Image: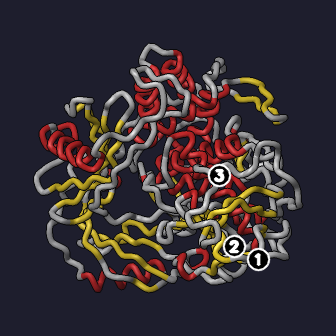
Amino acid sequence: MRRPHIRSVAVAVAVTTAATGLAGTAFAGPSTGVEHGVTSEASTAASVVSAARAAAFAHASATGVSQGDQLHAQDVMTDPEGARHVRFVRTHNGMPVLGGDLVVHLSRQLAYAGVTRAAGHAVKPAASQAKLTAEQAEQKAAAAAKGDAGSAQLVVDARGGASALAYQVTVTDSRTTEGNGARTVVVDAVTGKVRSNAPVSDEFLSPKLLDTLQKRGETIDPATGLGTQGAGLADSSLSSVSSSAGATGYPKTVAGTGKSLFVGTVGLTVQQTARTTFLLKDPNRYGTETRDAKGTETESFGAGKKITSSSKTFGNGTTSSRASAAVDAQYGITKTLDFYKKTFNRKGIANNSKPAKGMVHWGKKVANAFWDPTCGCMLYGDGDGDMFKKPLVVLDVTGHELTHGVVDATAKLEPTFVDEQGNQYGEPGSLNESLADIFGSNVEFFTKNTKDTPDYLIGEKLGLQQKFLRRLDHPSLDRLEGTIDYWKPEVYYTEVHAGSGVSSHAYYLLAEGSGQKTINGVKYDSPTYDGGTVKGIGRTKATAIFYRALTRYMVSSTDFHDARVATLKAAKDLYGASSVEYKTVDRAWAAVNVTAANTPAARH
């Protein structure tokens, strides 16, 4: 489950050239593959940012930018056909604006071509002077989150259809968060009301689900056991395994082996640091590494213990070796990186060629797995030994959670509200969960491990009575979370995992179509809201459309109807407005009751 934090605004320009589609995808424009870098990338990016910022102010009625606003570029994206997209966060009179993000779209000639914006209103707060002191805000935040408050920062909270002067406070060691993690509390600077109170870490399992499992007496106990990889599944590094040192010098990069808990014996790329010392670190994937938290709740990767072996083999396939869970984690993380790199040319989770990291054995009796933006890494608990018997290091959990990291680095989709138990609600949060399921399942299809058959099921290896946690073809078959198949106005008030079924179902219909189908031995039967049929365009094209929509046309407040528009724009970019792909996107959303005709009034 994604447990969001309210993000502070960074002002550094992150230059990226994320690909818009899958390798081999046919584009409507002249390009025939993933995008390539441009000459003098930094200077080119600076000129694109400058043009986008000028266009935003020149078209203020459309972009919502006004006097006192400053735009800070987070992402510069260049499409194969030459269009540019600049993602901005905003400050107002020097204060970070929560919910003030926007994407300015430019033509090849750097002319203004449109905007995608989170706030549909001016972000200037109604009050310009705070009545609360920073100290008072810190006290309120500490009381709300039951922890230790850091320094309060003045912000503009532009979420929820209005703008207010507020304080943002990070509260650590919160007794209201699993593992005593941190929470971000936003306090109204005039009234003292707590506007939001959300955990920082992104947990896979929601409080609501944990409560349901406990009431049912169910346990999560994934089957383990040694096995061998399927044919052709030896480690395929992003570059060939080679040493950066001399023939006898260290460190050097070597091919290793891992004996995992869930996917058998797998190939890994590791680092040899001495004649008989090997480190669970992959130099070919930006230095991606998994460490042992040793039962602590640290959010500092540097505090984790390095995992070493006297041979090229790590783990023994059982929990008796602390390295076995680490093998699953490292394997899942590197395969997720490979999926994003080879499919979209995305260089790392944030597309900045930096390592993804993992820590296993996190905390004592923690029954969850997390994406932690503070650490910038995956954290895996060992289970509580009661309801959760083993670490949650299965492949689609890792793919799901790391995709939350991708969303954090792009659209930053946020739930609209969080209840006292920590459950999240609202369509942007549901869309975030859906994207994590969509791309998490794609990681399985990409990996092709015979011990974890690729499918459109999420959590099928967790040992649940219903044989899966969620599924994309017919979401309402999930009785644990009550996932829904179709959109209705009440989805706005639906817990995000339950609500995720709307867009997950639309994606499945786009990829595979409606009705009965068997894929890799798994039977699917996808219904439609109107009883009509949908003919799928294939997973490759569907995934290309959803990825382009996420990176180009989604922002923090994107709901399901916005997502429909975003995917239609993506399909038009890739295949043309008269294409079968474009028409099928429209049909897939209609099949889950998301149409232009039933678009609700804007809440943002």
**Image quadrant where one finds the N terminus:** bottom right
Q: Which one is in front, 512 or 79?
A: 79
Residue 41 coordinates in the image, percent (x, y): 30, 46
Left or right: where 261 falls relative to 488: right
Amino acid carrying label 1: it is Ser
Q: Which residue position is annotated with label 1? A: 310
Q: Looking at the rendering, which quadrant does residue 285 occupy?
A: bottom right
Name the residue rendered at 54%, 48% in the picture: 430
The residue type indicated by label 2 comes to: Phe
Residue 392 spot, x, y in % from top left = 72, 64
Residue 510 lies in quadrant: top right
Residue at image point 35% right, 42% down: 77
Q: Nearer the viewer, mark 1 or mark 3?
A: 1
Pointer 2 with pointer 1, Cβ within 8 A: yes
Horizontal side, residue 288 vs residue 411: left or right:
right
**Dot 2: few (<14), some (14–19), or many (≥20) neighbours within 10 Å?**
many
